[in-house]
Structures are given as C-alpha cells and as structure tokens.
Image: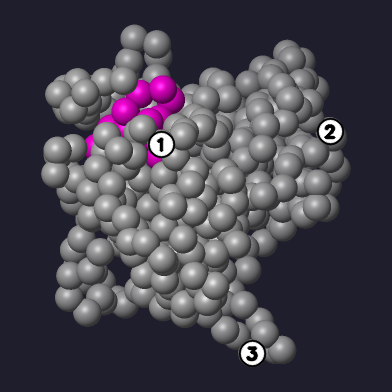
C-alpha cells in the first residue's frame, strides 16, 4: 500500500501526464483529449479512438463544475452523519484499511451528445466522448453505512464534494455552493456502489476525484461525486440545486409535468469508426465498430443500418457481458457502390428498451440517447 508521499507524488505526475495527453498526440497514436472548457476543466475523450473495454485513465473524460480542490491526504477526512446511530470520521488510511472491492463500470455525463441537439442548447457541447469505462477500487458504501447504523426513518443518502463555487449562468445559484447529490437509500445500499480511492489500479488523479470519490454504477456520472468529504443520511428527500434544478428533467405524472432527478443511464450505442465524413472505398470490407451501454440492465443486441434507418442488420457483440460495463461491438460492411451513406447503430437491453429516434424535450438537455447518424463518403 503506498503512503501519502507516494500518492502525492503519483498525483502530481498523473496531472502533468493528463495535461500532456490533452495537448499533443501520444506515441500510441492517441490524439489527445478534446477541450470543451479550460476552467473549470472539462475534457472529452475522442470516441473514434476507442480501442478496448477499459479506458486508460489519461484518456478518460473529465467533468468539473468548479476548480479542482486541493485536498492533502494528511488533512482529508470523510464524515458520515445525519440519521445514523454512530457518526463517523475517517482518515484516508483508515478508509483504505476497510474491506475493499473492484468494480468495472461505465460512467457517462448526463449531457453527453448535447452538441447534436438543435437549436444549440445551453451547457457543455459534448459530442460522443463524455463517457468511459474503468475499473474502480474502494470500500462498498454499505460497509460504511452499516458501521454508522442507519436509522429506520432514513430515506436518502446525501453526498457532498469539496468542489465549490458560484453558478453565474441561469439558473444562478444562491451564492457559492458545493456540488452535492443524493441517492435513494435502496440504491445507496446496493453492493456495487463504492467509495473509491483507485482507478485502473492506481490512486485517483486530482481531476478524477483524489483522494476519494463515489462511484454509482448504472447511473449517470453526476451521481458519482468527486472529492467526497461528507455522507449524510437523511429522513427527507434532498432538494439541493444539483438535484432539483440542474440534473433534473420533466416526468409526466397523471399528465402533469413534474421535475425529477436524473438517475439511471439510458440504453445507447455509439459508432466509433467510421468517423463523420470518413472516406471509404467501394467494394472493400470495412469494420464498423463501437460500444453500447445501459443502466442497471445488460446489452443484448446492437443493430447497424447503412441506409439511414430503412433496414437494420445485427452487429456482433464482443466479449462477455460484464454488469455496468459497456459492450464493444462490430459489423463488417462492404459498400457496393460510391455515394454518401448514413450509418446508424442502435442498442437494445435485456429489459426490451431500444434507443429512440428522437430526443424527448421533457429530458431537457440530459439523457440524450437518440439514434445518431454518421455520414460517410464512399468513392
């Protein structure tokens, strides 16, 4: 187990490597992350470079709402309070001494694909790459909740990060606020929800939540609070800014629109290659490939269309299904004649959910999983 000095040394170098990766092509041919915003730091994975089930840490997308906080290991503490029998305060070393597990999980920003909406929406204009899959190591949240002793009247668990600032665009925040979200108690008590200190076998880099973050497999990334400092068990539903104003959408309840928090990821397939406007040769086989993911279900089918959606053909799912992890897929396509083609991919999960053809306005600029086309030129 590395000590605090080793961890701080690692994170300084990891941060430098991340910046280098976003600025220049790597020796492996990785083109670097795409800048969506410099401060706070928001960087997108170039999805056409998808090469394997695990996304290297240096290539994983970065989502920040405020500047990255400086949290020295020596002074960091995790507080567990609220409707519990025993309030807890843990140091980093104490947390790492608790039983741990590793979970493979895909995280996707709730606004991924926003750049495809028209008219131009507010918010970061992510294209395809605000998504990635990594192995996360940490303590199951249930271990901490059991130690604290959750009271019978508890209904939710609130998670607060150290990142803090003002939201100056509408809807504005009432001054400086922390990033905070809650989970229903039933989800918080699922075995896969982790309080994480390692990503792909190494300590978390600062931009991914060092020293500790939450990871909620199956839910959009806003639930996986970074720079975690406080866990509060609550007897009433949380109605904070990031729970009811942002990262919330309209749900029809008996015909009336009601704002509810964004939660589970929606079924989705994305084409990595060919790229938009890529030139292909007629009569030459081409490997169309990408990834597909869903929330708490499993991908069972991916289909590809080479005629703009008029007909669909089954793609081949690669590797075995791993819970909460995207599924890579491929389809061998030989365009017969020259011309412009619109390629599409759509996924179906084991619950029978298939991607829609249009984005519902009730979802605002979140949960964007409509089937998207990739236009290519065959010569």
Location of mark 2 (residue): 314
Q: Which residues are magenta?
A: 196-206
Q: Is residue 356 magenta?
A: no
Secondary element at image label 1: loop
- The quarter of the rendered structure image containing the C terminus is top right
Residue at horizontal 40%, vertical 14%? Answer: 29
Task: Classify mark 1: residues with Cα within 10 Å, few (<14), some (14-19) or many (20+).
Answer: few
Report, in whole angstroms, how far the alpha carbon at label 1 lies from the one at label 3.
46 Å
Report, in whole angstroms, how far the alpha carbon at label 3 lies from the one at label 2.
39 Å
Report, in whole angstroms, how far the alpha carbon at label 2 lies from the one at label 1.
45 Å
Please indicate whether residue 361 sits to the left or right of residue 232 in the image. Answer: right
Disc 1 to disc 3: CB gap under 8 Å: no
Location of mark 3 (residue): 256
Q: Nearer the viewer, mark 3 or mark 2?
A: 3
Residue at horizontal 51%, vertical 50%? Answer: 142
Q: Is residue 198 magenta?
A: yes
User: Is residue 116 shown above or below 61?
Assistant: below
């Amino acid at each position: 187990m590395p000590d605090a000095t080793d961890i701080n040394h690692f994170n300084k170098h990891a941060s430098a490597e991340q910046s280098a990766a976003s600025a220049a092509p790597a020796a492996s041919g990785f083109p670097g992350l795409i800048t969506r915003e410099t401060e706070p730091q928001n960087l997108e994975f170039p999805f056409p470079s998808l090469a394997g089930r695990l996304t290297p840490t240096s290539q994983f997308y970065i989502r920040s709402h405020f500047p990255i906080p400086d949290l020295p290991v020596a002074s960091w503490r995790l507080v567990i309070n609220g409707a519990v029998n025993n309030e807890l305060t843990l140091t980093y070393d104490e947390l790492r001494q608790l039983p741990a597990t590793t979970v493979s999980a895909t995280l996707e920003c709730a606004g991924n694909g926003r750049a495809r909406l028209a008219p131009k929406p507010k918010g970061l204009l992510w294209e395809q790459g605000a998504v990635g899959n990594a192995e996360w190591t940490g303590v199951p949240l249930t271990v901490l909740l059991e130690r604290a002793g959750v009271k019978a009247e508890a209904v939710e668990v609130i998670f607060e990060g150290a990142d803090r600032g003002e939201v100056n665009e509408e809807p504005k925040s009432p001054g400086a606020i922390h990033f905070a979200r809650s989970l229903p108690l039933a989800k918080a008590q699922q075995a896969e929800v982790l309080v994480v200190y390692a990503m792909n076998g190494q300590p978390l880099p600062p931009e991914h939540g060092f020293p500790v973050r939450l990871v909620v497999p199956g839910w959009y990334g806003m639930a996986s609070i970074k720079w975690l400092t406080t866990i509060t068990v609550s007897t009433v539903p949380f109605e904070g800014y990031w729970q009811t104003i942002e990262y919330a959408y309209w749900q029809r309840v008996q015909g009336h629109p009601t704002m509810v928090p964004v939660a589970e990821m929606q079924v989705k397939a994305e084409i990595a290659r060919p790229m938009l406007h890529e030139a292909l040769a007629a009569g030459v086989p081409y490997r169309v490939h990408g990834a597909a993911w869903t929330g708490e279900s499993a991908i069972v089918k991916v289909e590809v269309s080479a005629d703009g959606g008029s007909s669909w053909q089954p793609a081949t799912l690669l590797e075995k299904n791993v819970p909460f992890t995207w599924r890579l897929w491929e389809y061998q396509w030989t365009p017969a004649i020259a011309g412009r083609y619109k390629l599409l991919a759509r996924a179906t999960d084991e619950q029978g959910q298939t991607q829609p053809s249009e984005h519902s306005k009730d979802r605002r600029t979140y949960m964007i999983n409509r089937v998207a086309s990739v236009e290519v030129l065959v010569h």
